[in-house]
Image (spheres, grey):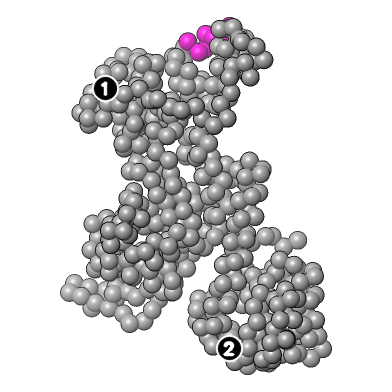
Amino acid sequence: MVETMNNSDLPILLVDDEQQILFGYSLILRSSGIENIITVKDSRKVMPLLEKQQVALVVLDLIMPRISGMELLEKIRLEFPRLPVIVMTAINELEKAVECMKAGAADYLVKPVEESRFLSSIQKVLELEDLQHEITSLKKHLLDGELENAEAFSPIITRSKKMLAIFHYIEAIARSQKPVLVTGETGSGKELISRIIHLVSGLKGEFVAVNAAGLDDTMFSDTLFGHRKGAFTGADKDRVGLIERASGGTLMLDEIGDLSKSSQVKLLRLLEEKVYYPLGSDMPEKSNARIIACCNLDLEKLISDGQFRKDLYYRLCGHQIQIPPLRERPHDVPLLLDHFITESSVSLKKKKPEPSPEIISLLCNYHFPGNIRELQGMVHDAVARHGSGKLSLDSFKGLMKKRGHISPPRQSAPEEGTVSLGDIFGHFPTLKEVEDHLISEAMKCAHGRQGSAAALLGITRQALNQRLKKKGGAA
């Protein structure tokens, strides 16, 4: 059985009994950046080929010897019902067009077909198939509830339902070639999410990141597209741009909202035409890099203020991911706290300290304007300062006061699906039953790691270990 692939990986099959037609339209496809093409002159070879080889779509002539195009269309729709077929023929009759469309043709083109009309039809059919594939994939992920690439998401420490939903969405859209717009506040993990998209996509090329903030139009063009020798004073040799380095891979553009208007036009051309011009060159270069754009600004507001192009925004929104801020993921705070304490202790070559329950309570009620990056910095500073076995609450409070961000206690509404104690135990439980249940749930959430489980419970690792011993489950 042929392995299932994304449409962008599959060839386009051209079927026509005239070699000149096959050559001409193959040339048009290649000039537009589509290199993977199969041509068949003998219509009898089409069905055996489709049995062995997956294709993205079939472009089919109607009038052919031996097996007619109409007969082939009916066979393809019967045996490969999800394979799109575009009919391209010299028959300019409404009745024949209606007959083909009823038989399942995706489009009907009359020869000679203009290049723009031909390419537009191909593009629309491929985009529709990609969309259908993504919807099917997303349904599968949502119904199965299991991640196919769980290891790829391991750098993100979370048990948030919102984040898990994002993981499933990433798996559904990762192999699409459409741009991805990743939005979220500063420090929320946009670059990490972008790297995971690249990893899950299976692209063979590099992941190349560039920060667009602070780049004027010339610097943007030179950085992204490169230049030719003599393009400007000091350009004594050719320079390869980052878009070429990302060939066959992913180019991540961070802080996309800071792009100048002229740079936005150049990026729009890259997205629309898949071509770019190095500085000092009149010859267009092709690009097959996937684009991921990241932004911490409100792009829709920038559009209304006239600072960002609406057409570019919609081009970038092939897929969109909004990363929730850390204050909307309070249950992740204890897990992240334990992770960053371990990380900082290793880097500073110190014995791992224990956080007090007061620290966990303080952090869970803090609104983290700098998100995960801010928490990481706070923990590193606290570990660097501590000299005993416990972290100092004052270290965290001091940083919050310095930044003017002390928050009142969080008044969270219960999450959807919240159940009462009676629902869990079948009766109102004793304190011992609640304690045992909480310890079991914490150990499950922390995947058996006592340090993380203790952080979730707001107790020390030693206290948790003692309770586990009493239950007969000490590690």
Q: Residues within 10 Å of mark 2 (few under 14, many from 20)?
A: some
Above/below status of 311 relative to 91: above
Q: Residues within 10 Å of mark 1 (few under 14, many from 20)?
A: some
In the visual, does 474 lie left or right of 380? right
Where in the figure is residue 472, as x and y percent of width and height?
62, 9
In the visual, does 199 lie left or right of 409? right
Magenta span covers which residues?
A: 463-470
Q: Quadrant of the C terminus?
A: top right
Decide which of tag 2 and tag 1 comes sooner along the chain: 2
Check disc 1 and report the residue beneath it: 397
* Secondary structure state at the residue bearing disc 2: loop
Main SS, magenta region, reads helix
Where in the figure is residue 426, as x and y percent of width and height?
67, 15
Above/below status of 133 relative to 434: below
Where in the figure is residue 143, as x and y percent of width and height?
66, 44
Q: Quadrant of the N terminus?
A: bottom right
Q: Are marks 2 and 1 in contact (CB under 8 Å)?
A: no
Q: What's under tag 1, amino acid-wise? A: Lys
Could you say which quadrant of the image residue 373 lies in? top left
Is residue 254 shown in magenta? Answer: no
**x 50%, y 62%: residue:** 178
